[in-house]
Image: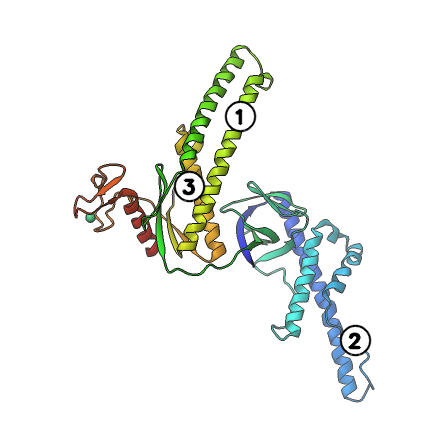
Amino acid sequence: MFIHKAFKFRLYPNQKQMELIHKTIGCSRFVFNLFLGKQKEKDAYWSITEEMKQNGQLSSNNWKGDYLNKYETIKELPELKKQYSFLKEVDSIALQKSVENLADAYSRYYKKQNKLPRFKSKKNPVQSYVTKHTNGNIAVIDDHIKLPKLGLVRFAKSREVHGRILSATIRRNPSGKYFVSLTTEVEGTELPKTNSAVGIDVGLKDFAILSDGTIYSNPKFFRSLEGKLVKAQRILSRRQERALQQKKPLNEAKNYQKQRKKVARIHEKIVNARTDYLQKISTEIIKNHDVIGIEDLKVANMRKNHNLAKAISEASWSQFRTMLEYKAEWYGKTVIAVHPTRTSQRCHACGHTEKANRPSQAEFVCQKCGHTDNADVNASKNIKELALAV
Ligand SMILES: [Zn+2]
């Protein structure tokens, strides 16, 4: 089963791109209104002839009361471009899509599902056009979106885009801001509801601790791989130093290059193993629970982080969160990110909050009510409570 998803982002087109967007909106409107006008004319002739027939002025209505045919109309576009050369400047798929929209509006009208299509106005506060994906003409590339004719347009990437891109709608709102909505198709099904909510605390020692007591520890081989990486990196920096001493350019330093590849290989192994693990546990959590509370962690700038294990964990946490969020969307579950302040110091039993409640990293002992718990489980219970209060 395929589900359609929509992803809306703010676009930041440059001057040239803005001009082309305006032109494309104008041309899409032009094509829409032109074919709508032609159809209205045909319909009007048909009505007049029909009236004359009924009045006995004509013996039959020989005027073909044609429905608007999508494919026949699209075929008229190349001829139209010869007549109105400005149409050649813009995305041809957008023009085609405009015809399709008109035809769809007519077919709904013929089925009595909506009113007769109306002319599009330049004065409409929101101006937009739609274009479709073919042969990679629409793609997300880092912080840019590739769009037909426009090329790479900068955008505010507030979330990851998942699934196969089907179409893009480019909008300009009355205040002059630009937006793009991508429609994608993902494979997914609603998972059965479990009526269960859970809070998740992520940590360095154990990867994730759930409020129901489930603990996902870091598999042991992660540590050994990380150890290998540290060692390999140490060798790499020694070789770098040696090359510098010998005034050898790094790209000519064979031993250095060999070691660099080795480091990259170990790194890749770690990333792959981590990703597999995160896929497995995120799917399990999404299956078992309907509402999942997580901490809204602001992951520290990793380049500043010299602790490798911590850096890797932080990268994994944000990857884990992304997985939970998109899987929740696929499978009809809910992920709620809560502010993490003091979730680790607050007693889940009585609400009392103080630093001394954590006599050690692992223990939670409430200084007021005496409640004791695994410190991470206590924290995840607080996260669950906060998530359910949203
Ligand atoms: Zn307490």
Crowding around mark 2 (Cα neighbors within 10 Å: few <14, some 14 to 19, many 20+) is: few
Image-based side of 76 in relation to 211, left or right = right
Q: Quadrant of residue 288?
A: bottom left
Q: Where 82 falls versus 117 (above or below)? A: above
The amino acid type of the residue labelled 1 equals Lys
Mark on residue 219?
none
Pair 3/1: label in front: 1
Looking at the rendered structure, the secondary structure element under dot 3 is helix
Q: From the image, which quarter does the N terminus lie in?
A: bottom right
Q: Is residue 301 visible?
A: no
* Distance between mark 3 and mark 2 Cα atoms: 65 Å
Which residue position is annotated with label 1?
262
**Coloring scheme used:** rainbow
Q: Quadrant of residue 130?
A: bottom right
Looking at the rendered structure, the secondary structure element under dot 2 is loop
Residue situated in front as seen by the camera: 295 or 117:
295
Mark on residue 317?
3
Q: Is residue 53 visible?
A: yes
The amino acid type of the residue labelled 2 equals Lys
Residue situated in front as seen by the camera: 310 or 42:
310
Image-based side of 284 in relation to 38, left or right = left
Q: Where 111 falls versus 192 (above or below)? A: below
Which residue position is annotated with label 2?
64
* Distance between mark 2 and mark 1 Cα atoms: 74 Å
Looking at the picture, how far across and down is residue 356, in whole percent? 20, 39
Identity of the residue furthest to the bottom in this view: 56
Pair 3/2: label in front: 3
Looking at the picture, how far across and down is residue 315, in whole percent? 44, 37
> Quick one: label 2 or label 1, which is nearer the N terminus?
2
